[in-house]
């Protein structure tokens, strides 16, 4: 309880990090006397970021100040189940008659046999883009295709697929080119319970070009993932965000904090110095390489052409189609496409 309960001076960045560390979707806000002030969900954080809040902003203005609570000694176990079932809250705080937080009930403890995992089950197709050479990961990729780079006991592509099978996905399409025969042989030996279909690129077609071979395959939105990333978030929430926003494509974006290690000069057009910002800090919402898209997006990809995902997104924007961004914390995204990030993933990533 002490980890989930935080004070309102916490920043958005700190709150996202705390949720990621705990594997929870909600925090409880208390003052220095442990009086309950409210609750803060990951949805509250996403809304704040998309509305222009900075990562260093306090959560003071974005948490829910009138949450549903239980009063100690004034409820039965069936009351807890009823609230969770009807309202789908992530947690319910328990307070005494002075409003002090004394306990927290978690959704998983009550309705999921004590497990934290509360992901909704959906079954949509998944495309994994696995045709690249992975030159940044040489010499590994001189021997193995990038999707078979090991993360602990399994190759990265198995970790990626398991994240989807957790929410009920069972239909996978893997685009292949470089060392594709090795990747196909691996799955033939693995004999997984889910279905894997391979989409052959005769030549490199960019980060989106091979999707042209899947035109007409899907009748509902589907996921697309690069083969060198791991994203730890609730994929069913990504799908809900995509559908609710009526987006043509949704980009899963990670918040990245960067400090320029120098003084940055601001100048006028004639070269006169306006001022110097010493080691300024910036926050960026970057593209992780994980998407949900509608089937009609595939019709925009030219046949037999080299096309990158940025070009597809630009085409959508030019056609006045909606493009959504689903923010996640930096700690929820692992990039295995280069050596420094690979080492970080081996140290930090766990199932």
Image (cartoon, rainbow, N blue to C red):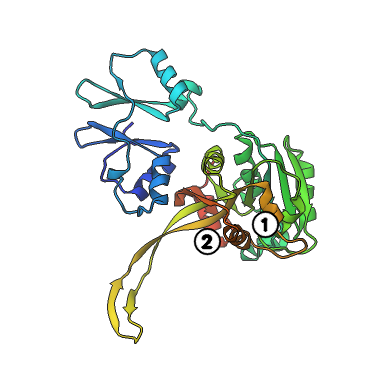
The structure residue drawn at horizontal position 22% and vertical position 36%, both measured from the top left corner, is 31
Q: Nearer the viewer, residue 233 or 326?
A: 326
**In the figure, 124 relative to 186: above or below?**
above
Q: Residues within 10 Å of mark 1 (few under 14, many from 20)?
A: many
Q: Which residue is mark 2?
A: 340
The structure residue drawn at horizontal position 39% and vertical position 36%, both measured from the top left corner, is 26
Which residue appears farthest toward the front when viewing the image?
A: 320
Q: Secondary structure at mark 1?
A: helix
The structure residue drawn at horizontal position 32% and vertical position 39%, both measured from the top left corner, is 63
Which mark is drawn over residue 146? Answer: 1
Give the image location of residue 248, x and y in percent. 60, 49
Q: Quadrant of residue 217?
A: top right
- Say whether residue 164 is left or right of residue 306: left
Which quadrant would the C terminus be assigned to in this image?
top right
Give the image location of residue 75, x and y in percent. 33, 14
Q: Is residue 129 visible?
A: no
* First reached walking from the N terminus: tag 2 or tag 1: 1
């Amino acid at each position: 309880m002490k980890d989930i309960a935080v004070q309102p001076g916490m920043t958005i960045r700190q709150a996202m990090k705390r949720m990621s560390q705990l594997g929870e979707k909600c925090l409880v806000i208390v003052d220095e006397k442990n009086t309950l002030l409210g609750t803060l969900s990951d949805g509250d954080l996403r809304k704040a970021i998309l509305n222009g809040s900075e990562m260093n902003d306090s959560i003071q203005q974005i948490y829910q100040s009138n949450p549903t609570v239980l009063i100690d000694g004034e409820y039965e176990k069936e009351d807890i189940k009823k609230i969770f079932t009807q309202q789908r809250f992530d947690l319910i705080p328990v307070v005494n008659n002075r409003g002090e937080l004394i306990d927290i009930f978690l959704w998983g403890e009550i309705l999921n046999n004590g497990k934290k995992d509360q992901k909704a089950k959906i079954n949509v197709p998944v495309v994994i883009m696995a045709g690249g050479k992975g030159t940044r990961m040489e010499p590994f990729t001189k021997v193995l295709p990038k999707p078979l780079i090991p993360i602990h006991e399994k190759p990265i592509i198995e970790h990626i697929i398991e994240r989807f099978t957790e929410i009920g996905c069972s239909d996978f399409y893997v685009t292949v080119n470089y060392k594709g025969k090795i990747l196909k042989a691996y799955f033939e030996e693995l004999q997984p319970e889910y279905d894997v279909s391979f989409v052959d690129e005769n030549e490199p077609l960019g980060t989106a070009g091979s999707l042209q071979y899947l035109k007409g395959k899907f009748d509902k939105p589907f996921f697309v993932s690069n083969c060198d990333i791991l994203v730890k978030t609730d994929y069913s929430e990504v799908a809900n965000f995509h559908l609710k926003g009526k987006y043509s494509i949704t980009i899963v974006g990670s918040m990245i904090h960067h400090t320029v290690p120098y003084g940055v000069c601001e100048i006028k057009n004639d070269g006169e110095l306006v001022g110097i910002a010493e080691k300024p800090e910036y926050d960026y919402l970057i593209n992780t390489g994980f998407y949900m898209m509608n089937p009609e997006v595939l019709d925009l990809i030219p046949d037999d052409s080299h096309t990158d995902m940025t070009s597809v997104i630009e085409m959508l924007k030019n056609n006045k189609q909606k493009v959504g961004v689903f923010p996640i914390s930096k700690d929820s995204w692992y990039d295995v496409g280069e050596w420094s990030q690979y080492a970080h993933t081996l140290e930090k990533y766990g199932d």
